[in-house]
Image (cartoon, helix red, strand yellow):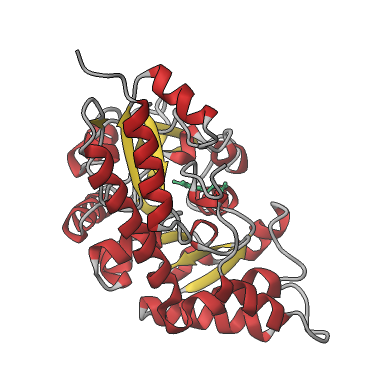
């Protein structure tokens, strides 16, 4: 049976660097609720990554990071604009609406999981009466739910449109590390320099056990966010166990090394499966995932051999997701099985 799978990067375990930092933090008594040196060090390292004095909060997961940060941007009569396949709408069980007391999430189309500035403007200008939930936030996912990327220029254009219409700019960065690694840019170029107000910076999929960071570049917006975290059940009392792994990840660019590796495995998977007759590729490969359309019997046969992968993400199709610990051998073994299990062309 395979030891590693392609279902999600959160099927992976904890990377050695995050684990070691956790172990190191597991000594003596330290102040609770984030008043410890691990947490201040992790926040400082994040400020170093972004080269700006941002406000940083650690919460348990991405859904909490997204819903609490979005709710901090809105009144209940506002709306949040995002892509049709956005995690905040499709995969968070209504948490953004729940935590914002009813702000509506409005879906916009766009090729390959990406919003366009024109699409955003159309949604804003569509209506201006009190019967329509007033757009207040535009949310993008970087890297997107379908494994594509916004370029810095595309983000700047959306940021400019957000500014023009007084929208807050939110980024779901569950795979932000993969995006930075793939684009080879300074993190600032795809965040605050493009107008992003708040980033949900994911750690879990890149090798930590638990704990994502909410990073406010717009520091006014961060005001009283600690109360929202506490009320939302997201203030970890033993905070060092969320923050210490970030220290392990951010020192020596470990986070980028792991993301680069996952991306390289995604590229290898893409090259191998794209060469198999009958496999239809659904999206360009830009980070650590490959989306393919496979015949139903082939999917069943792969599952029977023990391979785990999802076939309901994004716009359907099978998602093959690589992670920080995927090996080249894992990818080659999977691709070989897939080639064997495809129907013989007639
Ligand atoms: C995984 C993921 C999240 C966070 O999910 P949690 O399970 O709540 O940690 C958020 N956005 C995207 C795009 C994701 O893939």
Of 51 and 183, which appears nearest the observer? 183
Residue that lies at the very extreme toward the top in this rendered image: 346
Q: Is residue 146 visible?
A: no
Identify the residue at horizontal 54%, vertical 27% (top origin): 304
Residue that lies at the very extreme toward the right in this rendered image: 29
Horizontal side of 323 relative to 59 (left or right) equals: left
Q: Quadrant of the N terminus?
A: top right
Q: How many labels sit on residues?
A: 0
Q: Position of residue 342 (x, y in %)?
A: 32, 25
Horizontal side of 80 relative to 69 (left or right) equals: left
Tell me if residue 261 comes above or below residue 95 in the rendering.
Answer: below
Tell me if residue 74 comes above or below residue 254 in the rendering.
Answer: above
Tell me if residue 64 comes above or below residue 52 in the rendering.
Answer: above
Q: Which quadrant of the structure image shows residue 135?
A: top left
Q: Position of residue 16 (x, y in %)?
A: 57, 73
Q: Position of residue 112 (x, y in %)?
A: 25, 38
Q: Is residue 231 visible?
A: yes
Q: Quadrant of the C terminus?
A: top left
Horizontal side of 310 relative to 277 (left or right) equals: right
Identify the residue at horizontal 69%, vertical 71% (top origin): 241
Identify the residue at horizontal 61%, vertical 62% (top origin): 211
Tell me if residue 85 comes above or below residue 247 in the rendering.
Answer: above
Of 126 and 175, which appears nearest the observer? 175
Q: Position of residue 159 (x, y in %)?
A: 26, 55
Horizontal side of 308 relative to 259 (left or right) equals: right
């Amino acid at each position: 049976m395979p030891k590693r799978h392609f279902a999600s990067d959160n099927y992976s375990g904890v990377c050695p660097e995050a684990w070691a930092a956790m172990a190191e933090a597991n000594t003596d008594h330290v102040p609770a609720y984030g008043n410890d040196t691990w947490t201040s060090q992790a926040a400082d390292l994040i400020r170093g990554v972004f080269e700006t004095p941002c406000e940083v909060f650690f919460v348990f997961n991405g859904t909490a990071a997204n819903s609490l940060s979005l709710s901090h941007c809105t009144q209940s009569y506002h709306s949040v604009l995002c892509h049709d396949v956005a995690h905040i709408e499709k995969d968070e069980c209504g948490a953004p609406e729940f935590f914002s007391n009813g702000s509506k999430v409005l879906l916009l189309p766009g090729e390959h999981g990406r919003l366009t500035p024109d699409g955003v403007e159309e949604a804003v200008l569509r209506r201006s009466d009190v019967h329509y939930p007033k757009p207040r936030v535009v949310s993008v996912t970087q890297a997107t739910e379908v494994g594509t990327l916004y370029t810095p220029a595309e983000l700047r254009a959306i940021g400019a449109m957000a500014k023009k219409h007084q929208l807050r700019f939110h980024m779901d960065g569950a795979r932000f590390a993969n995006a930075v690694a793939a684009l080879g840019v300074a993190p600032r170029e795809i965040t605050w320099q493009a107008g992003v107000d708040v980033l949900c910076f994911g750690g879990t999929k890149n090798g930590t056990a638990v704990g994502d960071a909410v990073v406010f570049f717009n520091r006014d917006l961060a005001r009283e966010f600690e109360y929202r975290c506490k009320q939302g059940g997201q203030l970890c009392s033993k905070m060092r166990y969320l923050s210490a792994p970030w220290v392990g990840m951010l020192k020596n660019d470990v986070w980028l090394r792991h993301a680069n590796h996952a991306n390289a495995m995604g590229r290898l998977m893409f090259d191998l499966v794209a060469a198999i007759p009958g496999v239809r590729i659904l999206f360009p490969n830009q980070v650590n995932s490959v989306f393919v359309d496979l015949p139903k019997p082939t999917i069943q046969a792969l599952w029977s051999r023990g391979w785990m992968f999802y076939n309901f993400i994004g716009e359907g199709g099978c998602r093959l997701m690589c992670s920080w610990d995927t090996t080249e051998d894992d990818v080659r073994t999977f691709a070989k099985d897939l080639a064997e299990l495809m129907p013989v062309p007639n």
